[in-house]
Amino acid sequence: MATIAVTDDTFDAEVRQSDVPVVVDFWAEWCGPCKMIGPALEELSEEYGGNIKIAKVNVDENPNSPAQLGVRGIPALFLFKNGEVVSNKTGAAPKAALKSWIDESV
């Protein structure tokens, strides 16, 4: 399962109403660290299959969702479970660290 692009309009349906935990990556095209973790998130999305959804929100095109969550820096990762934020982290990290964070949070 590849990562999915989520917009302000689809955020509630894709993230808050999801039957599985969702990792939301708030990113931007111009953000170097965001580009660094992109491939790792794609790989993790494949590894988790349908057990965990990984969603990407472009903050330049969708300002409302990050504003509601108080995102101040990117990349910002939020883990939602049952529609609620259970964990979040800011900044790039290697794939192994991202996987550990997800596994600990779920």
Image (spheres, helix red, strand yellow):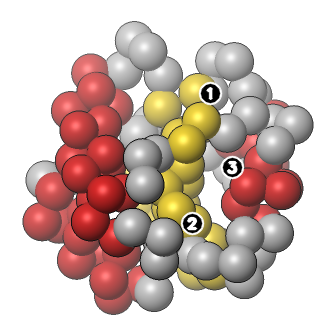
Q: Nearer the viewer, mark 2 or mark 3?
A: 2
Residue assigned mark 2: 22
Crowdedness of circle 1 by 10 Å Cα count: few (<14), some, many (20+)?
many
Q: Quadrant of residue 64?
A: top right
Q: Is residue 22 left or right of residue 64?
A: left
* Location of residue 24 in the rendering, given as x and y in whole percent from the top left corner: 55, 53
Q: Residue at x 24, y 51 (%)?
A: 43
Q: Is residue 72 above or below residue 99?
A: above
Q: Quadrant of residue 71?
A: top right
Q: Is residue 93 left or right of residue 42?
A: left
Q: Nearer the viewer, mark 1 or mark 3?
A: 1
CB atoms of marks 2 and 1 within 8 Å: no
Q: Can you say which quadrant of the picture contains the C terminus?
A: bottom left
* Location of residue 95 in the rendering, given as x and y in whole percent from the top left corner: 16, 57
Q: Can you say which quadrant of the picture contains the N terminus?
A: bottom left
Q: Quadrant of residue 7?
A: top right
* Location of residue 38 in the rendering, given as x and y in whole percent from the top left corner: 30, 37
CA gap, disc 2 and disc 3: 18 Å
Does the rendering let one see residue 59? yes
Q: Residue at x 13, y 53 (%)?
A: 94
Mark earlier in primary sequence (2, 3)? 2
**Viewer-side residue, 3 vs 80:** 3
Q: Nearer the viewer, mark 2 or mark 1?
A: 2
CB atoms of marks 1 and 3 within 8 Å: no
Is label 1 in a helix, a strand or a loop?
loop
Residue assigned mark 1: 59
* Location of residue 42 in the rendering, given as x and y in whole percent from the top left corner: 31, 45
CA gap, disc 1 and disc 3: 12 Å
**Viewer-side residue, 88 vs 79:** 79
Amino acid type at circle 2 is Val
Residue assigned mark 3: 70
